[in-house]
Image (cartoon, grey):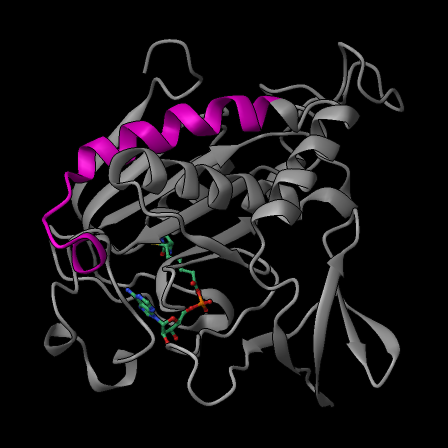
Amino acid sequence: MPGTRFNDIRHFDTVDSTNRYLLDEARSGAPDGVVAVAEHQSAGRGRLGRRWEAPAGANLLMSVLLRPGLPADHRHLAAAVVALAGADAVMTVTGLEPGVKWPNDLLAPDGRKLAGVLAEADAGAAAHLPPPPFAGSSGGSGGSGGSGGPGPPIVVGIGMNVNWPAADADLPAGLVGSATSLQQQVGRPVDRSEVLESLLRALEPRVADLATESGRIGQAGDFRARCCTIGARVRVELADDCFEGTATDLTSEGHLVVEVDGVARRVVAGDVVHVRSAGEPGASGGRVAPE
Ligand code: BT5
């Protein structure tokens, strides 16, 4: 795609998972910016071993390989910029304004899930990268830049419900009430290639921003501004604890701050469910976990 790093877009009729494919390519040295798009995934994956459902030929199923050279504590931003670019594309193509649920799902205005993002870093592949030319500098022209910096390559996949489900009756019972599509929201079929092109165009400057500290601060600010989890009543489910509170902020590292009985608790990793009071439209049952 001219003017972007996304000039190698590989289309598949069927693949097990576009994330799995690009992680393997990364291990073989594939460069920053390779994109994989599938009509169908036979083993589309969500977080924590969960499955991503989509019938053939209806939705956007894509992954990008990024070598952003992000500091370890900022790697969540790779997923965040893809979620933000997904939201940009939805707004450009349909006019719908999705919310971004922490850490990186897109929700329709009625609270149902339109898209999910899965970021996977391959620590093993980092060994194949050259050392950063200016290790220790931040924001300069050297070691943190776009086409291959320190740190592992990161594959970020997004599954966006474009034309499926067309109606709730299309969904398996487990997703009724929690999943929706662009078509269902706007009442007409939506062109998947327009969404893909718009997403990649929006993603380019956001990924470029990851190379500098000021750019990262800007992206984190965009994420905070779009994050519909802030201000929401949430239930946080940790391995050994579960509590409810109100999400009040995101830290610059992307951790969620949840106030529980007047005490601020920082959530780094865990599942978060937006809790809605009776009478509010569709609760998001989507569980959220960090990559
Ligand atoms: C996610 O996981 O939301 C990340 C999904 C990432 C999918 C993309 S598709 C391209 C790339 N290649 C892959 O193999 N994966 C990525 P998580 O938050 O764990 O949500 C998964 C849960 O969402 C499932 O357990 C279901 O409950 C629900 N779900 C499954 N398919 C859905 C869909 N199409 N729409 C809404 N919810 C869905």
> Ligand 1 falls in which quarter?
bottom left
Which quadrant holds the C terminus?
bottom right
Residue 56, by quadrant, is bottom left
Could you say which is closer to the camera, residue 89 or residue 186? 186
Q: Position of residue 262 (x, y in %)?
A: 87, 80
Up/down of 234 relative to 115, above or below: below
Q: Position of residue 243 (x, y in %)?
A: 71, 88
Q: Look at the image and tell me whether residue 123 can be seen.
A: no
Q: Would you say 155 lies left or right of 191 here?
A: right
Q: Residue at x 14, y 62 (%)?
A: 55
Residue 184 is a magenta residue: yes
Residue 45, by quadrant, is bottom left
Q: Residue at x 22, y 45 (%)?
A: 38
Residue 174 is a magenta residue: no
Q: Position of residue 94 (x, y in %)?
A: 25, 41
Q: Would you say 158 lies left or right of 267 here?
A: left
Up/down of 110 relative to 117, above or below: below
Q: Look at the image and tell me whether residue 21 can be seen.
A: yes
Could you say which is closer to the camera, residue 180 or residue 27? 180
Q: Would you say 68 lies left or right of 197 here?
A: right
Q: Position of residue 126 (x, y in %)?
A: 65, 37
Which quadrant holds the N terminus?
top left
Q: Residue at x 19, y 52 (%)?
A: 186
Q: Residue at x 39, y 48 (%)?
A: 97
What secondary structure prevails in the magenta region? helix
Question: What range of the chain is rendered magenta?
Answer: 183-208
Up/down of 7 relative to 223, above or below: above
